[in-house]
Image: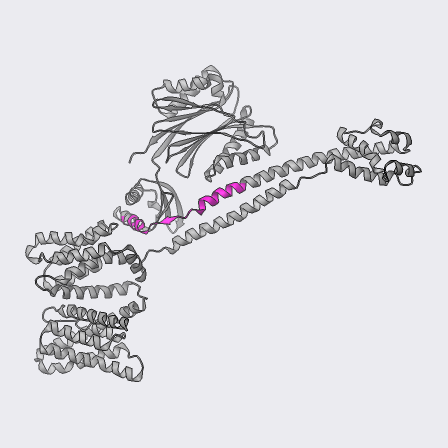
């Protein structure tokens, strides 16, 4: 009962207020095209007939204050109520068309009290008001059902409603205070945040200008819209932007605005500023203008599905690894001796005249008499008559045949044992590879398990900034993962590499960005991917001197950027020199580059690479010297496998990073030497192969690095190789130098 009562009170209040505003929207020469636009749609959609009719009649009389207006309102109510009563009697809902048409014709008798000139105005007002009611009906019906979606038609109707309400509310004034300002101060921020447009508040102000002939409402609304667009990301400032705009207009047009209206402006702005964000999000979603989160949720859902699949694959690889380790093949010497003794007992002793004596000697089985000799033969690789027990030497008539068969079986066993050892070694290597690949998949799963967050507001800012830069963009997506922003923009392919695109996206994101890549989409479009730039960057210099008398360098160097946030410099020195050494070092560097690009750590990557290199079985090995610099934290990881010392040149002096550990490709299990150093802007890291350190030593390399007055990495690399080659050219000499510096801007 209470709910019905409050609903009736709300219907009465809304109908009364709207009818007053729409009745006040009267244009010269007496044209009032909206006066029934609130009452008839609300009544047609099942509103309380008594409450709505009473509100309509009172509102019309309160505004018109004449018996003619009261009579016209009463006739309209009577005409609208007749179809409603008929529908109630027939227990069938009346179509809104009959309600509106009946109300229109019910007003016509008032023509008898008007001069002939007033007939045209009465008919025009009635027809336009009926048309306005028809236009409102579909939108109000959808709003009641909760299915209203703002398309082009809904925007047109909403604009017409705003025009009517703006005109009417501006004309209603009590003691110089107009509800126009309260409605506009609420409409402006809600329209921007719910519908992402300032057109409706501007049309609202145009209605006020049309009915009054005063341009100040439009000027103030236009200024407020510009301020809101500039401050769109700050809800509180947007809410009070109209207050600032009206204050500026008051200074320009002092007589057009009462200072008392600032109370309404402040009240409306205060309400909008402190409405919870959930109100705007849910409101935009109800109107079909909410942020499209489904594609973003699909991205994270797909990532999690991939995580699950990688988990299944990794588990299968681990089970494979365990199975391969358990499949150790071949009998041991004891098992082989037992098996062969049984075979010889069954083949040699059958039909022997001494069988009974041998069975008694062997405790019921002649196999035990052979087992000792067989075990010694398998261990030594050959059987002689000295290996036979004393009893067999004196009593066995087939001793020679036994020795011949045993030697033949021993040869077969040793060959099988060698093959079995090779198979076991291969199985162990494959098991190690499976375990290593499973570890790589675990790292990928860890990275993909992190949920990516998307930012619809910044996407709109990116599109707006690109438009200001004169670049047509079809779509934008802004994602953030672990504090690193990633932006993807779809635009014309020929524009993707332009510097103004990068500058516009960086301005919108309020942080420097880097262009990660461009993907062609077809039809002349491309997707440009950007990533927030790390605070540091690096430049690299390289120098190489080939061993005297050699045609190819056995050293291989690499400079690789890893996902934009890290940079890796690496050196690999193959065993010896020339092309053969170069192939080995190139293979090691290629594996390092490819695995590190996946983001896998060295404790997983290096054992896996070592397994692959040891499977070559060519007896070669490779040293590995790496430095991975994190451009966000300025931390450098030095990873060394039988690599010589490195040098760090700092502003306050130099530092030697010690080498160590066995090289790749010798032992199946390795443990690299890993050390982490904190770098600063301007520091230089110098890596060199043993051809340099063997010639001048780590101290000599540090002396050369410090002696130069430059931090140019190319100059430093050239100087180190020049001094080393002056002392000796007995080996290939390669130097890679990296200088870290802080980005500007």
Residue 233: percent from left, percent from top: 26, 50
Q: Is residue 342 above or below residue 580?
A: below
The residue lying furthest to the top in this view is: 727
State which quadrant residue 21 falls in: bottom left
User: Does 434 lie within the magenta span?
Assistant: no
Residue 145: percent from left, percent from top: 32, 69
Residue closest to the eye, 295 or 580 = 295
Tell me which segment is drawn in magenta: 437-464
The reply to whether residue 407 is visible in this rendering is no
Residue closest to the eye, 288 or 267 = 267
Tell whether 539 sits left or right of 620: left
Residue 226: percent from left, percent from top: 19, 52
Residue 516: percent from left, percent from top: 38, 41
Residue closest to the eye, 327 or 372 = 372
Q: Residue, x 20% and y 64% (percent of image)?
A: 162
Magenta stretch prevailing secondary structure:
helix
Residue closest to the eye, 458 or 493 = 458
Q: Is residue 458 above or below residue 409?
A: below
Tell whether 200 sits left or right of 515: left
The reply to whether residue 143 is visible in this rendering is yes
State which quadrant residue 360 falls in: top right
Q: Residue, x 45% and y 44% (percent of image)?
A: 447
């Amino acid at each position: 009962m209470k709910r019905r009562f409050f609903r009736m009170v709300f219907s009465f209040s809304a109908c009364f207020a709207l009818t007053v505003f729409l009745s006040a929207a009267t244009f010269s020469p007496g044209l009032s095209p909206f006066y029934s636009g609130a009452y008839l749609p609300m009544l047609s959609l099942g509103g309380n007939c008594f409450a709505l009719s009473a509100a309509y009649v009172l509102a019309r009389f309160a505004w018109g204050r004449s018996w003619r207006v009261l009579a016209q309102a009463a006739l309209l109510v009577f005409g609208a109520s007749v179809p409603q009563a008929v529908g109630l009697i027939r227990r069938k809902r009346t179509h809104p068309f009959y309600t509106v048409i009946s109300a229109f014709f019910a007003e016509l008798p008032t023509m008898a009290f008007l001069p002939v000139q007033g007939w045209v105005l009465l008919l025009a007002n009635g027809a336009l008001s009926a048309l306005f009611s028809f236009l409102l009906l579909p939108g109000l019906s959808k709003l009641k059902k909760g299915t209203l979606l703002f398309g082009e038609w809904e925007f047109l109707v909403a604009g017409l409603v705003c025009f009517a309400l703006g005109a009417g509310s501006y004309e209603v004034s009590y003691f110089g205070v107009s509800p126009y300002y309260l409605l506009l101060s609420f409409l402006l921020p809600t329209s921007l945040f719910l519908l992402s447009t300032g057109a409706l508040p501007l049309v609202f102000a145009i209605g006020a200008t049309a009915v009054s002939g005063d341009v100040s409402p439009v000027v103030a609304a236009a200024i407020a819209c510009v301020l809101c667009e500039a401050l769109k990301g700050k809800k509180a400032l947007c809410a009070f932007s109209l207050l600032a705009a009206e204050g500026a207009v008051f200074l320009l047009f002092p007589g057009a605005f009462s200072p008392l209206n600032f109370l309404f402006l402040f009240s409306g702005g205060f309400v909008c500023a402190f409405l919870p964000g959930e109100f705007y999000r849910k409101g935009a979603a109800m109107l079909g203008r909410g942020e499209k989160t489904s594609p973003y949720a699909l991205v994270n859902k797909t990532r999690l599905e991939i995580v699950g699949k990688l988990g299944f694959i990794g588990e299968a690889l681990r089970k494979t690894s365990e199975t391969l380790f358990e499949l150790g093949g071949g009998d041991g010497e004891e098992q082989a001796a037992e098996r062969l003794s049984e075979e010889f007992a069954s083949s040699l002793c059958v039909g022997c005249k001494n069988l009974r004596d041998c069975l008694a000697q062997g405790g019921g089985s002649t196999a035990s008499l052979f087992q000792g000799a067989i075990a010694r033969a398998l261990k030594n690789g050959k059987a002689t008559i000295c290996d036979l027990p004393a009893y067999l030497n004196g009593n066995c008539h087939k001793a020679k045949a036994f020795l011949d068969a045993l030697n033949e079986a021993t040869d077969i066993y040793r060959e099988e044992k060698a093959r079995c050892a090779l198979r076991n070694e291969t199985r162990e290597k494959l098991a190690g590879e499976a375990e290593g690949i499973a570890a790589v998949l675990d790292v990928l799963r860890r990275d993909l398990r992190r949920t990516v967050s998307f930012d619809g507001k910044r996407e709109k800012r990116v599109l707006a900034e690109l438009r200001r830069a004169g670049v047509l963009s079809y779509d934008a997506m802004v994602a953030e993962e672990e504090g690193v922003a990633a932006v993807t923009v779809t635009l014309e392919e020929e524009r993707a590499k332009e510097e103004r695109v990068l500058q516009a996206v960086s301005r919108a994101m309020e942080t420097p960005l880097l262009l990660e890549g461009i993907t062609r989409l077809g039809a002349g479009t491309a997707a440009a991917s950007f990533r927030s730039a790390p605070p540091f960057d690096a430049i690299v210099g390289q120098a190489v001197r080939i061993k005297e008398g050699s045609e190819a360098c056995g050293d291989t160097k690499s400079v690789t950027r890893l996902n934009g946030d890290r940079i890796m410099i690496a050196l690999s020195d193959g065993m010896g020199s020339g092309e053969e050494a170069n192939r080995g070092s190139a293979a090691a560097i290629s594996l390092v580059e490819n695995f590190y690009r996946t983001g896998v750590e060295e404790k997983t990557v290096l054992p896996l690479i070592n397994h692959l290199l040891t499977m070559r079985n060519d007896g070669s090995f490779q040293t590995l010297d790496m430095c991975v610099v994190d451009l966000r934290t300025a931390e450098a990881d030095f990873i060394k496998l039988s690599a010589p010392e490195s040098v760090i040149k700092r502003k306050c002096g130099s530092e030697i990073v010690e080498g160590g550990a066995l090289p790749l490709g010798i032992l199946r299990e390795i443990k690299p030497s890993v050390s982490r150093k904190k770098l600063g802007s301007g520091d230089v890291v110098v890596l060199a192969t043993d051809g340099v350190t063997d010639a001048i030593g780590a101290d000599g390399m540090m002396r050369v690095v410090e002696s130069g007055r430059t931090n140019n990495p190319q100059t430093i690399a050239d100087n180190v190789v020049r001094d080393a080659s002056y002392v000796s050219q007995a080996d290939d000499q390669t130097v890679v130098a990296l200088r870290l510096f802080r980005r500007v801007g």
